[in-house]
Structure formats: C-alpha cells, structure tokens
Amino acid sequence: MVEPRQRTAGFSLSEVMIASALGTIVMAGVMSSFLMLSRSGARLVNYNAISVESRRALEEFGQDVRMASSVTWNGTDSITLTVPGNYTGTSNLVTYAYDDATTGATARSFYRVPGDGSAATGQYILARNVTACTFSRFDRLNNPSVANNTTKRIGLTLTLSATTGGTAAATETTQSASFVLRNKPAS
C-alpha cells in the first residue's frame, strides 16, 4: 500500500509576493523618514550656526558703537568709528563693512578692520555668507539722521544664509537695537 504524501510546510508564490510588496512599502517609509530627519537636522545645524554668528557680530559691533565718540559714514556698506582707548595703532579708528569675501560676490562677509578701512590688513570677519547688510543711523530724538555730526544712534540689520549638501537654504535676518554712541556729544 502506498502511503499518502505528507504536505511540507512553506509559502506559496502569491504569499511571498504579497510579503515582499508589503516589506518594500515599509522600507520605503522608513528610508523617507530617515532622509527627512537628516535634512531637518542639517537645516537645524545651519540655523544654529548662522544664529550664533550673527549674534556674535552684533555684540562686537555694539560694543564698539557704544564706546565710540564719533562716526563717519563711508557709504551704504561701511562706517568708521572713533573708539577712544581702543585701536591706538590706527588713531582709535575702526571700520565695519560689508564687502565681497576673497571667494567672490556670492560669499559676502561682514567684517571689522582697524583704521579707516583703506587697508585690508588686520581684517577680522565677524559673519560669513551675508546676503544683506544695512546700517541705519538716527539722531538723539531717534529720527533718521543724514549727517555724521547729528548721528547719535546706529542700528544694524544682517541677513545670513547657509546651505549644506542638498538641503534648502537656512536664512535668518537679525536686527539690532539702535546702539547709542555714549561718548559722542549730542548735537
């Protein structure tokens, strides 16, 4: 007598195909979540870096403005301050400017240089990847000023942008309070 065959355990082809399709969908979801989280992390790092850089630049700028006894407006992208007791090698002059960095017009920087700004030696970059920089000046009553002798307050607005890899640009605009030139007599 022939014994019946025992059925062996296993999956049919249709079961394997369905399991493979479901596994692919789950893995696609996991991978897209991972990529989204890594891009978000990279943007967060960019935001943090430009935030720290802009705060540091505003703090150093504000410190010199508060101690300044006079200001010379060199144009829309540069001012020279007279800071008594500091920068003695350059007649107490220091210039803050927004200009092209050495890498070209797309990588602009906000920097400080001792002196009247005519020499590039001693340049200290305060913020990189600056896309916009605006100096504003006010008189003692906080009205817009147009002359160096009536300027009693100075404000600064910086816009920085940074990208890493294929992430979208992280852009931040930081506006200072108006800093009072404490050592400058009111006009």
Image (tube, rainbow, N blue to C red):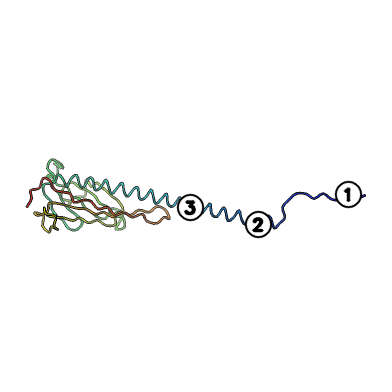
Horizontal relation, residue 143 to residue 15: left or right: left
Mark before the other along the chain sequence, 2 or 3: 2
Depth check: 127 or 50 in front? Answer: 50
Which residue, as the protein is rendered here, is positioned at the far front?
141
Residue mark closest to the camera, 3 vs 1 = 1
Residue 92 drawn above or below residue 142: above
Q: Secondary structure at mark 3?
A: helix
* Amino acid type shown at disc 2: Ile
Horizontal relation, residue 176 to residue 146: left or right: right
Residue located beneath label 2 in the image: 18
Across and down, in percent, residue 124 comes to: 24, 46
Q: Secondary structure at mark 2?
A: helix
Across and down, in percent, residue 57 comes to: 25, 47
Across and down, in percent, residue 99 comes to: 24, 55
Q: Which mark is residue 3?
A: 1
Residue located beneath label 3 in the image: 35
In 3D space, how far apart are the residues under numbered discs 3 and 1 (Cα atoms)?
57 Å
Across and down, in percent, residue 140 comes to: 11, 52
Mark before the other along the chain sequence, 2 or 1: 1
Q: Residues within 10 Å of mark 2 (few under 14, many from 20)?
A: few
Q: Are marks 2 and 3 in contact (CB under 8 Å)?
A: no
Give the quadrant of residue 158. bottom left
Mark before the other along the chain sequence, 3 or 1: 1
* Amino acid type shown at disc 1: Glu
Q: Secondary structure at mark 1?
A: loop
